[in-house]
Amino acid sequence: MLTEAPVGFLRQYSVEFISLSVFFFICSVAWRLLSPKLSGKDAGGPVKELKEKSKGFYGAPEDTTVDFSGVRPYKPDFDIHAEEPEQWWRDGYISDRVYTATMALRNLTFDDWLRIDKNYPSRMQHKKNTFATMGAEAIDCREGGYDACAELLAMLVEYLPRRFPTVFTLSSDGRTIHSHVTGESFEIKAPYGGLHPLEIIGRITEEDLSLLTEGPDGEYVLKATVSAFPAGFDIQAKMDKPLTEIHGPVPTYKEKLQKAMNKFFKSVGASRLVMRVNWSINDHEELFLVDGHLYEGDEDAAADETIDINEVQLRVERQVIRRLPRTGAMCMLTKTYLYRLVDIADQPGFAARLGGLLHRLPEKFAFYKGKPVWGKVVLEYLDEMAAKHPALARREGEEEEKQV
C-alpha cells in the first residue's frame, strides 16, 4: 500500500503526481480553447446544441419536420366493416381504485396516430349533419388558427392514405384526397375548393379536434376546434381561452395539474405521439352532449330515477396529443367510444370494478361527472350485476390495478 512506502518515495510520488496534474490541467484548458475553432463551431457548439435538442422527455419543441414516408398500413387488406371498436372497458382501463386527477400520459408509436373501425361510416354522417345543424357550436376557427389548420391537413393527407390505403387515396397530381367510405373528395391544396382546411379535416377524420397556439404569456390558447362528439364541452365558451381557463371547472386542476400541463405543452416535440384516456357516464344515448357535467350553481341537482338503464353508456375518449412542427401549435385528436352498460356489465369483473370506482369517487369529482343525477340508478344496477359474480370482485387487501 502507498501509506507503507518509505518517506522519500512519498515525496517523490507527490512531486510527480502534482506535475502530472498540472500537465493534464493545461491540456484540458488548451483543448477547450482550441476545439471550437478546430470544429468551425462557436464555443459550446455541437454539445450545447445536442443538449438543447434533448430537453424534455417527449422530444424537443425545435423539431421542424415530420416524415410519414415510413408509415405502414394498419392491416393488410384492411376491411373497415369488419373492424370492431376497441374495448376500452376491459382490465387496465377501468379500475376500481380511488379516482385521482392525473395527466396519465402514455407514449404511442409513430404509426398509431388515428384509428378507424366499423363505426366510421355512421360517425362521419353524424359529423356532416352536425356541422350543418349546429354550425359554430360544432366547428370554429379563430384568428391565429388558420395556419395550424392548414398544416394539420397537410400532415393528415400524408398519413391517412399510407395508414389506411383501402379507405383513402390521393389523386395522381396530389391535389385531392378521396374517401372510399363516404364517396367524397376534397381539394387539399389552397384554395381548398373554397372550403376552410378545418372543415376538410372534420370531413375526413372521425375524431374531434383541438388546436392550441402559444399565447403572449406562454400559456397555450384554443384557436380551432371540431366538436361533433362533445361531453360537457361548449366550444363557444372555450374559444380563445388559455388552458387554465378551459380547465377551470375541473376539480383540483389548479392545485395538481396546471403546472404539469403547461410544462408538458411547452416541452413536447413534434416527433412524439402521446395518448391519454378519459371516461364519463352518459345517462342517455347521445353523441352531441354539451351538458355532460355539473358546475357551480348546479348543487341542487337531484337523482333522476326515471333514467332508463338500457340507455346509460360508458363513454371513453382516446385523446392523442402532438405538436405541429412548422407552426408549433399543439393538436389533440379525440376519438369517442360508447358502450351501453347493459351490453358489458355481465363481462367478468367489469361491474365490480366500475361500481367500485363510482362508489369511491371523491365528492368534487362525483359532482363534476354528474353522479348526483345518474348515481342511484347506475350504482344499483352495477351492484346487482357485481353480486352475480362475487368471485370476480377485487378481494380486500389485493393489490390495486394501475389506473390509466
Image: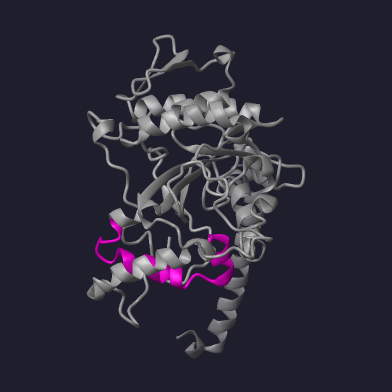
Give 218 or 402, whichever is nearer the viewer: 402
Residue 353 is covered by the magenta coloring: yes
Rendering coords of residue 262 (x, y %): 64, 53
Rendering coords of residue 239 (x, y %): 68, 40
**Residue 50, quarter of the rendered image:** top right
Going 46% across and 63% down the picture, which residue do you hit? 305
Going 55% across and 38% down the picture, which residue do you hit? 227
**Residue 226, quarter of the rendered image:** top right
Asked whether, in this view, residue 164 is left or right of residue 297, the answer is: left
Q: Quadrant of the N terminus?
A: bottom left
Asked whether, in this view, residue 177 is left or right of residue 220, the answer is: left
Give 57 or 150, whichever is nearer the viewer: 150
Q: How many marks?
A: 0
Does any portion of residue 374 appear in the rendered image? Answer: yes
Rendering coords of residue 104 (x, y %): 48, 58
Going 23% across and 31% down the picture, which residue do you hit? 76
Going 37% across and 32% down the picture, which residue do you hit? 122
Does any portion of residue 96 appear in the rendered image? Answer: no
> Taken as a whole, is the magenta stretch helix, strand or loop?
helix
Magenta extent: 344-370
Give 138 or 69, whichever is nearer the viewer: 138
Position of 5 relative to 186 (above/below): below
Q: How is the image coloured?
A: one colour
Q: Quadrant of the C terminus?
A: bottom left
Residue 136 is covered by the magenta coloring: no
